[in-house]
Amino acid sequence: MSYVVQSNSLSKRYGDVLAVDDLTFAIEAGTITGFLGPNGAGKSTTLRMLLGLAKPTSGHATVFGSPYDQLQTPALRIGAVLEATDFHPGRSGRDHLRMLGRAVGLSDARADEVLSLVELQDAAKRRVKGYSLGMRQRLGLATALLGDPELLVLDEPANGLDPEGVRWLRDFLRDFASGGRTVLISSHVLAEVAQTVDRVLIINHGRLVAESTLDELTARVGSVVRVQSPELDRLAEALQREGIVATKSNDHALLAQGTTRERVGDIAHAAGVAIHELATEGSSLEEVFLDLTSEEAPR
Amino acid sequence: MNQLRAELLKIRSTRTTIGLLVGLIALALLFTILTCTLTPMSQLFSEQDQVSLLSFGSIAGVFAALAGVMLFTSEYRFGTIRPTSLFNPNRGRLFATKITAGVLSGLVFGVIGEGLVFSIGIMILKIRGVSIVMSGANMTELIVGAIVGTALWGAIGVAVGAIVPNQVGAVISLLAWGFVVENLVFGFLPKIGRFLPVHASDSMMGHIEDKLLPGNGGTAVVVAWVLILAIAGVALLKKRDVS
C-alpha cells in the first residue's frame, strides 16, 4: 500500500490544552480524503504539523515518507492552502505567485498558467485587497498549484464560498484527483465535502473518532438500507443467510439493518432477486457526523 | 539565489519600501537644504563641522532598519509567513535570505540617503563660498561608513523583526531604542553608550568626537550587534511554530 501522508501518534499540547491527542492515520495515494471535525477539534493544528509549520509535542508525521521540512523542495510535490487570507493586501495576485514561484525556481509563466487555471487571469494585476473572498480562495488554490503538486492539502477551502464557488471547487478537486493525485481537505461541515471525498477522517477533541468511507460510516452507526423487490421473502432469506437482519415495513419494503446499499445489492444479485429500489435510510450523514463529534461522544 | 530573487521581488512588489524611500528622500533633502543654508558661516569651516553636517545621510539607517523589520513582521501581520514557510521550510535558510535582502536594501537606502545629503550639501556649501576642508580620506570614510552602516541597520531590522514578529511592537521597540534609550545611555554613561549600535555606527563615519569609538572599532561593534541579534532571531524563528 502506498501512503502519501502518515501520522504516527501525533500529539500537540499548548499549555494545559491538548489540541491533538495521539493521532494516527494514513492516506493512500490517489484518494480524496475529508478531514472532518467541529471547530477547535485539532484539524488545523494537525495539518500544520504535517506541513512542518508546527512541531509535534510527541509523535511524528511524514509526507511522501519524510518530514515535510526534510523533503527536497516540498512545494514542487505538495500544495497547501491553510488560510484564505494569506496575502499581502497591497501586492497583486500575480506578484504573490511570481514571488513564491521564484523561491523554488519556477518561471513567471507558471504564475500566469495557474492564474488561468483558477480563472483569475483578468484580475492578475489587481492588488489583493480588491479581491472578493471567493477570488482569494482561488488565489490560495493557485498558490498551492504553483509547483504542480502530487498532493493538495486544503484547510476549510469552502469557507465563505457561495454555492457556485463550492460547486466550482468540487469540480476542480474531482478533476485534480482524476489524474491519480491525492487530496486532503479539512472541513467542519460534512455536507461541504460529502459529494467530493472518497473517505473521511473524523476527529473530535484532538482524537480520531472515525476513519472510513462515507457508506461504511453510515452503516456503522446503525443506518438502514431500504429495498423494494417483487420477491421480498426470498431476499429476506438471502440477507438472513448472510447474517443481516431485515424486517418488512408497512409499505412493503424490506429494511436491512447495519449494512450498506452495495452489500444488499450484491446479495440480491447473487440470489437472483430483482430489486426496484435501494436506498439508505435512518441516520443522515450529518446526523452521524454530529453524533460522533458531539460533546457527549465517547472520548 | 532563487530565494533571494523572491525576497527582492517581495520588497519591490508593495508600496511599503517605496514609501520609506520617498520619506528618506524628503527628509534628507529638507534637512540638508535647511541646515546647509541656515547654519552660520562660522560653524562651517572646520573639518568636524563639515563631517557632522554631511553625515546626516546616516538617517537612512532608520529607514533601512524599518524596511528590514517589515521583511519579517509583514509576513506575520498578513499571514504570508505560512506560504513563505511552505515554499522555504528551512528556517535557517529563510533567515539568511531575508537578512541578505535586508543588507541589499540597506545599501540602496544608504547610497540614496548619503548620496543626496553629501552631493547637495557640498553644492550648497560651495555656493555659499565655504571652502571644503575635508580630506579625500575623510570624505571616503564618511560616505562608505554611512552606506555600510545603513546596510548593517537593514540587517539589524531583519533580526529585530524575527525576534519581535508583531509589527507595531517591533517598530516601536526599534525607534524607542534608537531615539530614546541609546541617547539616554550615551548621555549619562558614554563609555557604555558608545558600544551601543546607533553610536557605534555613528563612529563608522569618522565623527571627530572623543566619546565615540574609532571607525574600525565602531564597525566591529555594529557587526557584533548584527551577529548577536541574528543568532537570537534565527533561534526564535526555528523554535516558534507558524500558527
Image (tube, coloured by chain):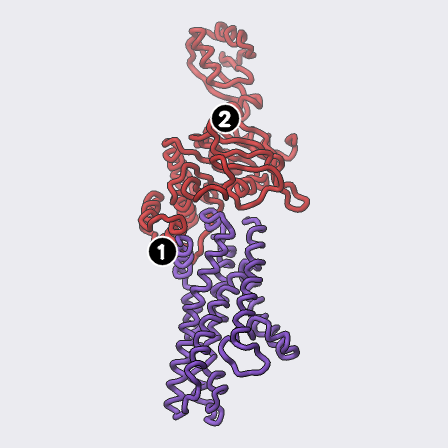
Q: Which residue is mark 1?
A: A126
Q: Secondary structure at mark 2?
A: strand
Subunit of label 2: A
Q: Residues within 10 Å of mark 2 (few under 14, many from 20)?
A: some
Amino acid type of the residue that numbered disc 2 sits on in the rendered structure:
Thr
Q: Which residue in the structure is indicated by mark 2?
A: A213
Identify which amino acid the numbered label 1 is placed on. Answer: Arg
x 58%, y 54%: residue? B235
Tell me the element at label 1: loop
Q: Is residue A35 left or right of residue A147?
A: right
A46 w.r.t. B189: above or below: above
Q: Nearer the viewer, residue B96 or A254?
A: B96
Q: Is residue A61 above or below residue A288?
A: below
Q: Quadrant of the N terminus of chain B?
A: bottom left
| The disc label shown at residue B169, or none | none
Q: Colour of chain B?
A: purple
> Furthest-right residue in view?
A16
